[in-house]
Amino acid sequence: MAQGPVFRPSRSYRIFQALNSIFMLALLLTMLVPFVNTLALSFSTPRNSMQPGIVLWPDPFSLSGYEVLFKQIDIWRPLLNNTYVAVVGTLLHVMLSAITAYALVRRPFPGRRIFVFLLLVTMMIPMENIMIPIYVVYKDLGLLNTLNAIVVSGAVSGFSVLLLKNFFEGIPVELAESAEIDGATDLRVFAQIFLPLSLAGLATVTLFQFVSKWNNFFEAVLFLSDTSKYTLQIALKSLIINSDITSTTDAVVKNTQMAGVVVSVLPLIILYPFLQRFFTSGITLGAVKE
């Protein structure tokens, strides 16, 4: 059997590949080295963590930073507050966005195009431009200084609705019509047909929103003043910045500061592998409509 021509990369192509690999490696190091340094400092002794330079391996290994973080500083309360905001806020966001997308796809109504256009407009307005009106509304609703203020903030976003709308439009309409002929209600069609066939889109929205809620800082600073309601990001800000500007014996050593950073990113590192296989296909399929 005759074989096709064998591809032989040219010299310029090999040089490009080598330079591209070097560039990608350098880019990887700019992200990997700071994280490894943070991880190593969190497991270092208080004295060694204060030494200048980059540390890539703790010598000796110590858990004193985590002991101080959980026993003396009591990071548990901000951690639980952050978990509540991230979990409840994400569930509310995914549910409302999915219901809105389903209504746009399955139940045409007058002015639907205008509604979609307004969703696009909301994606162009940054939070900083509307923080004063939002603050006034939340004050009138009695939500200030409560965790629910952060939960309901951004409960629905144009990006999530339009992404799920594209997913739902890819589901054969015959499936829904057959179910309706058999007597299925809208709720049953939504829960048993549209949601199971859109797991990639739901996982994408879930990952985006969970990361956003978990890392939320601006809205927490804006709406919260009670220290017992502080989320993890505000606690880390107080832990790191306030300790760096004081010279008293109450200053938190760097290994404890880095332990707080590790605790804050650990849930995201644990969550991502479970949603990764949905995430890539979710972004690709949800962004393209035939």
Image (tube, grey):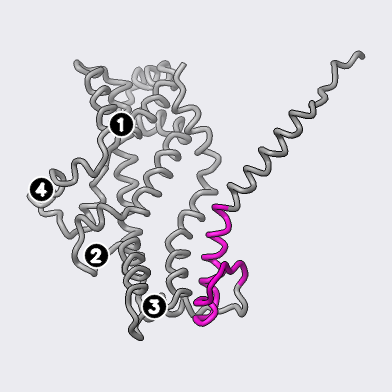
Q: Label 2: state its secondary structure.
A: helix
Mark 3, mark 4: which one is toward the viewer? 3
- In space, the residues marked 2 and 3 are separated at their CA atoms by 21 Å
- Dot 3 or dot 1: first in sequence order is 1
Q: Residue at x 54, y 66 (%)?
A: 39
Q: Residue at x 48, y 35 (%)?
A: 200
Label 4 packing within 10 angstroms: few (<14), some (14-19), many (20+): few
- In space, the residues marked 4 and 2 are separated at their CA atoms by 20 Å
- Dot 3 or dot 4: first in sequence order is 4
Residue 236 in the image: x percent, y percent?
36, 66
> Which residue of the protein is positioned furthest toward the top in this rendering?
2
Q: Are marks 1 and 4 in contact (CB under 8 Å)?
A: no
Residue 275 in the image: x percent, y percent?
50, 44
Task: Please tell me whether residue 102 is drawn above or below residue 136 in the rendered image.
Answer: above
- In space, the residues marked 2 and 1 are separated at their CA atoms by 36 Å
Q: Which mark is residue 187?
A: 1
Residue 219 in the image: x percent, y percent?
25, 52
Residue 155 in the image: x percent, y percent?
26, 42
